[in-house]
Amino acid sequence: MGIWNKIDGDRLELGGPVNEAGPSGWSLTRRPDGIAWLVLDAPGLSTNRIDAAMLTALNDILAGLEADPPRGLVLRSGKRSGFMVGADIAQFRAVSDAALMATELAKLHAVFDRLEALTFPTVAVVHGHTLGGGLEISLACRYRIALSSAQLGFPEVQLGLHPGLGGVGRSIRLVGPSQALPLMLTGRTLRAPQARRMGLVDAVVEERHVAAAVRAAIDGKLQRRPLKGLDRALGSGLGRSIFADLLKVQTAKKARPEHYPAPYALIDLWQKHGGDFKALKAEEIGSFSRLLVTPQAQNLVRLFFLREGLKGWAKGGGAIERLHVVGAGAMGGDIAAWCAYSGLTVTLADISPKALGGAMKRAAKLFDRRHLKGKLLREAADRLIPDPKGEGAAGADLVIEAAPEKLELKQKIFAGLEAVMKPGAILASNTSSLRLEDLRATLARPERLVGVHFFNPVAQMQLVEVVRHDQADPAALAAAGAFVNRVSRLPARVNSAPGFLVNRALMPYVLEAMVMADEGLPLEAIDEAAERFGMPMGPIELADQVGLDICLDVAEILSLGLKTPLPAVPDWLTVKVKDGALGRKTDKGLYAYRKGKPVKRPVAKPLDDRAVDRLILPMLNACVACLREDVVADEETIDGAMVFGTGFAPFRGGPMRYARERGVAEVVAALQGLEASCGPRFAPDEGWKALSP
Ligand code: NAD
């Protein structure tokens, strides 16, 4: 027995003696005051998580405690990273047998039930990540004490699931359906004080007060707040039925049941069984297991790994601390603000003092939206330095150019930058459509040029395309990728080609919508067709949001650079742009705008599935062309980039996954059908032939 050192790797000091852990990671220590401390420090993992082996070991420990009961039991994590999270998500991959899953889950439930049934007081002391199954195991204890670092939540809904280890019933019983259901339906994370206000934890304390708080809990001195009157009313069948309908209406505003069944399954589960805790717990097993085998959940589980894949290639690349951004317009200003928010020191240059002033104002708004206050706000603001003379370029590790999309202008800017930049510094362009091969032509050191293509709005779009040309230094690319990771964006590796991946795939979607509008189809019906497929926003609204001027520019550049024909740009689009109707930013575009929102009429007659294909299949076709031309290395990068860069129906797992699920032959046949009826722009790309069926 010994006291752990203060900072011993990932271990946490627990303020008292703790036995060494057994092979399962559990250690049980009975202290002289009669309280047993059960600590988990899963071997070889940075975070504790729930799995069958650790629960089997826990089951044995619980049997010992039943035979020789302590005065109370404390459940803690020995890891600095946090208390515990749920199952290893890898275990959810490729699960196809719901009945088998239910049998396995029932065994895990039995351990949770055993913990809950102990006759002496049990206290979970939680810190850091206390998510999913980790929160669920704490709910099987009689009390929960949180350190202020605790973050608690049920993220399962993001994987197309709901809690599956008794958390549905236990959270509802503890804090009432009016609070527990929205928590599970949104997947949001609570900070410790919020969890305390909700009643999910009984106390929030500092580490030095944990032992006293534990004693207070075990002595029955912690006050638990009673359920609200509303929650008591929701105990009746009628109350549940009314509230369930209300929740479904609210949920439907965000997600359709055919796209995201999990929230609806959760509401149904509670509506049917909410009056009977045991039945609710038992039925949760079947509901969770049925959800897990749905294509939607499997695709969302896969997305988790696609995200990891995008991050993974650039882990550990060179360290970028000082950033210089040239151009404080829509993109440069927001990139600079985002990077300062993310902890980098950023100098921001522009020839226009007005643009610089505007960028600084937008940065202040970003910091406010992100709830930066006091010292954190001052520090972020200090990190963003307006630099009208461009002096920061000399000290920067990375320079991002975000000047207007004109080759000669960018080359002139590069010449000035090259003269002052540090030898090892990287030069990046945020160009959307210019060829890196042209941009590099006048550089003395072309190898340090890379593309880092952020999307608009920078603070919301997770993806950044990191663009390689054939003379780029691999170390510069890796450092650019690591920089993107560092500012919490996802770097997708693409090769230099017109429109890279995302714009190239998105443009046919947007332009086809314009052709359909030209044919007289209502704008709202076109958008509805895409949303019915699962796109977060229809193509017409998207065009307005991106800006019709930008759409026009990208369309022109793509039509020049690509062999595959694009839908012709309608004349009226050019006229609109000339007239200054540029979309949302001018409050006038394809839609009219009121208070920044498009004015849409209800859709009288939804378009048929062929119309959906007209919009979606050209996107798939462009993705396959990118694969064939080696713009991207693999289908996973395409799917990750399209979901995180365009919002492509996440529950479908990305365009390539969708093509695979629907069947390559079937997609090719549908494209051929459209080619016959609508024209050669639908001709299936040669690349489909190379895709294994
Ligand atoms: P913008 O016109 O809003 O901003 C460009 C800024 O550069 C202006 O403030 C201008 O004053 C400044 N500038 C001009 N010449 C300069 C010089 N010599 N030195 C310093 N600053 C100078 O343009 P934007 O929309 O921010 O686009 C910038 C780049 O980002 C372009 O390459 C564009 O293709 C790309 N991009 C744009 C979007 C988008 O949605 N707007 C998305 C992705 C990428």
Image: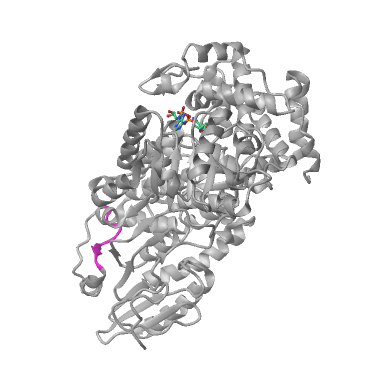
- Say whether residue 388 is left or right of residue 565: left
The count of marks equals 0
Any part of residue 235 in sight: no
Q: Is residue 594 left or right of residue 481?
A: left
Looking at the image, the residue that sits furthest to the front is 419
> What residue is shown at x 65% (from left), y 27% (from top)?
558
Residue 550 location, x and y as percent?
A: 53, 25
Q: Residue at x 51, y 15 (%)?
A: 577
Q: Which residues are magenta?
A: 198-206
Place residue 675 in its image quadrant: top right
**Spot occupied by residue 522 in the image (x, y as percentages of width and height):** 55, 15
Can you say which quadrant of the picture contains the N terminus?
bottom left
Is residue 370 in the magenta section? no
Q: Nearer the viewer, residue 372 or 149?
A: 372
Residue sitting nearer the eye, 602 or 300: 300
Q: Nearer the viewer, residue 61 or 15?
A: 15
**Image side of residue 374 versus residue 658, left or right:** left
Q: Nearest the camera: 474 or 638?
A: 474
Q: Please, is residue 397 above or below residue 134 in the view? A: above
- Colour scheme of the rendered structure: one colour
Q: Quadrant of residue 452?
A: top right
Residue 95, compared with residue 326, is above or below; it is: below
User: Does residue 203 show up magenta in the picture?
Assistant: yes
Q: Position of residue 31 (x, y in %)?
A: 29, 85
